[in-house]
Amino acid sequence: MTSGQPTGTGGARSARAEAEAPAGAKRWIPALTVFRRLLAAFLLTSLVPLLATWYIARQVTLDNAERLAESQLRYEAAQIAGRTDGWLQLNYESLSEHADTILIRSMDPDLQRSALIDIVKHQPWTVLAFTINPDGMSLARSDNLQPINYSDREYFKTAISGQPLGQQVAISRTTHRPSWIFGIPIKDTAGSVRGVIAKTCGLSELTDQLFNSRIGQTGRALLISFDGKLAAMTGGSNDKELRDFSQSPIFVARESRSGLIRFMDGDRPTVAVVQPVRFGWLVAVQMEESEALRAVKETDRTMMILLLVAVLLSAAFAAVVAPTLSNPLIRLTQIADDISRGRFHDEIPGIDRTDEIGALARSVERMTRSLRIAMERLTSRVLK
């Protein structure tokens, strides 16, 4: 018996703990009052359609914003590319025509010099025009300087090999600005290469245009040469060396003809389009993604405001409607509790209502009458 008492006591304590544990756990679960149920219902019926509308509106706005941004950037790129293409072609055709003249083919320095001076005179952007012998030494120059060895220049190597165009972009030592240096082979009537005619063109005709371009708030245009060197950029300037863009996403994707190119410009998400130009040159126009997709942010902001308004209205409606349902139920619960204790009420509130609460009130009223009659009969029998 002695050993059994602790067991019994322990069992009682264990049973008591188990009985109290759920009650303690339930304290952490909020009661689903009428207000909370109504609020949940109102939120469900208002937020679900709003969230679905938000998703659809955001997708539509995103597609439209991307198409609009691409159209704007492509328009700007086409304008710049058109002028760049025309300028490059003009210089190439002009030098090609001079390469076929008798004066240049003669490979006579005196005769060539007059033609070279004429090129510089009629093309203000031309800094220097010159011819080069097959050994790489300059033959005639428009500036009358001493011969210079050009054998290590890439544009000379390409042109002397018979290719129609050899080119290079570099910072001019005279103007300290980007220059396009290109050469064209000088051929005799038999088609043999006898030398190279070349000229150095300042890019101010293009760089000034790009420098002053205004494309939205964050947009800018870039002119990239055939070898990936940055020739000009909106609002930018070159230092002693040209910036290398050969590994940039916009240069790598230079053959892209549709869609936006997305990449990180520093720490800013950026979108861009590219427009190839003749001779391997490239025009790119870019802007920050936040500006391109500004309409999406505005849509998100608007929908967030609508969601907040929906939550506030749901809470307000629940606060207004809940008392009309909960107060009668609370009162009927009190009356039912009083009845269970033998206290009967003469009037039951809500019996005139036509809803479920009214039906409950009438049921409580009938129950009260029935219990009152039963109690009266039981009392009369006891007294007898």
Image: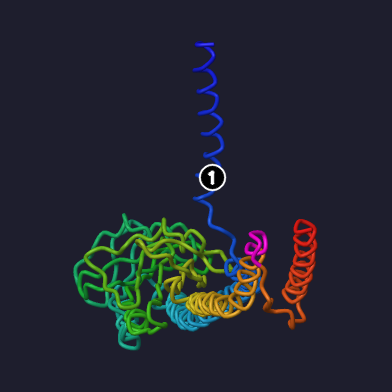
* Identity of the residue drawn at 77% across and 67% down: 367
Q: Is residue 56 left or right of residue 319?
A: right
Report if residue 39 is visible in the image.
Answer: yes
Quadrant showing the C terminus: bottom right
Q: Image quarter for residue 111?
A: bottom left
Question: Looking at the image, which residue is at 48% across and 75% down?
Answer: 297
Give the class, few, some or many, for how many residues have Cα within 10 Å of label 1's Cα (few <14, many ≥20): few
Q: In the figure, residue 357 lies in which quadrant? A: bottom right
**Residue type, numbered disc 1:** Ala
* Above or below: residue 242 compared with residue 295: above
- Closest to the observer, 323 or 188: 323
Callout 1: helix, strand or loop? helix
The answer, for residue 111, to whether it is visible in the render is no
Question: Which residue is disc 1 drawn over?
Answer: 23
- Which one is nearer the viewer's eye here, 64 or 283? 64
**Residue 135 x/y as whole percent:** 33, 56
81 relative to 227, above or below: below
Is 179 on the left or on the right of 158, as rendered?
left
Report the magenta residues as a range: 337-343
**Observer-nearest residue: 154 or 100?**
154
Horizontal and vertical percent position of residue 241: 25, 63
- Judge whether residue 12 is colored magenta: no
Q: Does the magenta stretch include residue 338?
A: yes
Q: Residue at x 67, y 59 (%)?
A: 340
Residue 64 screen position, x and y as percent = 60, 78
Q: Where is residue 379 in the image (x, y as percent from the top left)?
A: 75, 60
